[in-house]
């Protein structure tokens, strides 16, 4: 059996009309767009799952780091209290943490502005598909 005879447009041994060919192309383009949408959904879901797992680990590490810094701060206050009044020692340690918090906030804000939540690969292939659908002979 030749490849021409197994083709759906030549199944009955005759050439397809232009209308049938356009119908086939339209169906294929619709199928392609549906598949691209499914690809985008899958891509976003996979990335969200990975991000969720990473966020859980960051949460655990953050809590552990918080406990370390809490006790380190307490030790700093107690150490400074040996050379000055306890209130001043606590105020100095608090001021240091305020500066650190401000710097971290600013850096986080700057980095957050670079985040792109859209699926880049799928968007690019959808643009290519749309361009091809408008001009299939190019």
Image (tube, rainbow, N blue to C red):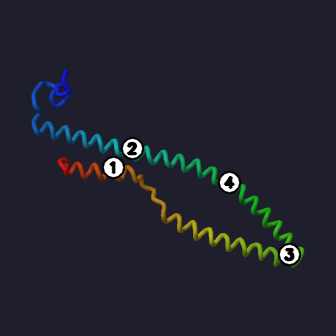
Q: Find numbered disc 1 in the image and state the secondary structure of the residue it sits on.
A: helix
The residue identified by callout 1 is 125
Q: Nearer the viewer, residue 128 or 101?
A: 128
Residue occupying the point 19% across, 37% down: 24
The residue identified by callout 2 is 39
Residue 67, percent from left and from top = 75, 58
Residue 115 circle label? none
The residue identified by callout 3 is 86
Horizontal side, residue 44 vs residue 6: left or right: right
Q: Find numbered disc 4 in the image and state the secondary structure of the residue it sits on.
A: helix
Q: Quadrant of the N terminus?
A: top left
Q: Find numbered disc 3 in the image and state the secondary structure of the residue it sits on.
A: helix
The residue identified by callout 4 is 61
> Please, which residue is most extreme toward the right here?
82
Marks 1 and 2 sit apart, C-alpha to C-alpha, by 10 Å
Name the front one of labels 4 and 1: 1
């Amino acid at each position: 059996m030749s490849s021409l005879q197994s083709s759906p447009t030549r199944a009955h041994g005759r050439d397809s009309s232009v209308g049938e060919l356009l119908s086939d192309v339209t169906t294929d383009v619709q199928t392609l767009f549906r598949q691209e949408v499914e690809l985008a959904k899958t891509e976003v879901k996979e990335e969200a799952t990975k991000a969720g797992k990473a966020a859980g680990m960051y949460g655990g590490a953050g809590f552990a780091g918080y406990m370390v810094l809490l006790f380190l701060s307490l030790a700093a206050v107690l150490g400074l209290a040996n050379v000055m009044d306890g209130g001043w020692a606590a105020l100095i340690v608090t001021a240091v943490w305020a500066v650190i918090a401000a710097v971290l906030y600013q850096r986080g804000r700057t980095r957050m502005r670079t985040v792109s939540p859209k699926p880049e690969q799928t968007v690019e292939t959808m643009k290519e598909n749309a361009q091809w659908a408008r001009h299939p002979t190019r």
